[in-house]
Image (cartoon, helix red, strand yellow):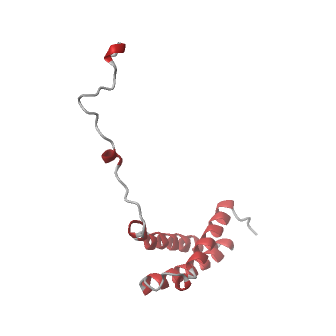
Amino acid sequence: MKARPLPVTAAAVLMALISLAFLPGPLLPGSETAPALVVYSGIVLGVAGLIAVVGLWMLKRWSFRLTVVVSVLNLVSAAPGIPFAPGAVKIVPWYRSWSLPSSSSSSCDRSRGGL
C-alpha cells in the first residue's frame, strides 16, 4: 500500500470541511430568500465534494479531477456573494484615496537647507 502524501491528506481534510459546510443549506436561516437553484446546487456540490474526499483518501486518480472541478464550481458559485453581500464594503482604488499636495505647501523645508 502506498503512503498518502501530506498535501493529499490536507486537501482531503479541507475538502471534507468545505463539503460538509454546504450540506445543511436549506436548513440555514435566510435560505428561503435564496433561489432554489443556488441552495440545491450547494447540496449537489457538497455531495460531489464528499465523493472526491473518499477518492482522495483512497488515492484514486479520478478524485484529483473531481476535486478540481468541485473547487472551481464552489468558487464560481460563491463569487456573486462577495460584491452583493449585505454589508459588503465598497473598495476604493488606492490611487483615488491619495490626495495631491497643494501648491502652497512643500514637502521640504527651505529654511533648513533643503533643495
Residue with the most extreme right position:
1
User: In the figure, residue 85 lies in which quadrant?
Assistant: bottom left
Q: In this view, does 99 lie to the left or right of 19?
A: left
Q: Nearer the viewer, residue 92 or 43?
A: 92
- Position of residue 115 relative to residue 18, above or below, is above
Q: Picture coordinates of residue 78 (x, y %)?
A: 45, 71
Q: In this view, does 111 lie to the left or right of 88?
A: left
Image quarter of the N terminus: bottom right
Q: Picture coordinates of residue 35 (x, y %)?
A: 41, 84
User: In the figure, residue 61 lies in which quadrant?
Assistant: bottom right
Residue with the most extreme left position:
103
- Position of residue 95 relative to residue 79, above or below, is above
Which residue is drawn at the image coordinates 64% and 61% (left, top)? 7
Which residue is drawn at the image coordinates 33% and 14% (left, top)? 111
Q: Tell me if residue 59 can be seen.
A: no
Q: Which of 41 and 21 is in front in this view?
A: 21
Image quarter of the C terminus: top left
Q: Tell me if residue 18 can be seen.
A: yes
Q: Picture coordinates of residue 15 (x, y %)?
A: 60, 70
Q: Is residue 11 left or right of residue 45?
A: right
Which residue is drawn at the image coordinates 42% and 66% (left, top)? 87
Q: Picture coordinates of residue 50 (x, y %)?
A: 61, 78
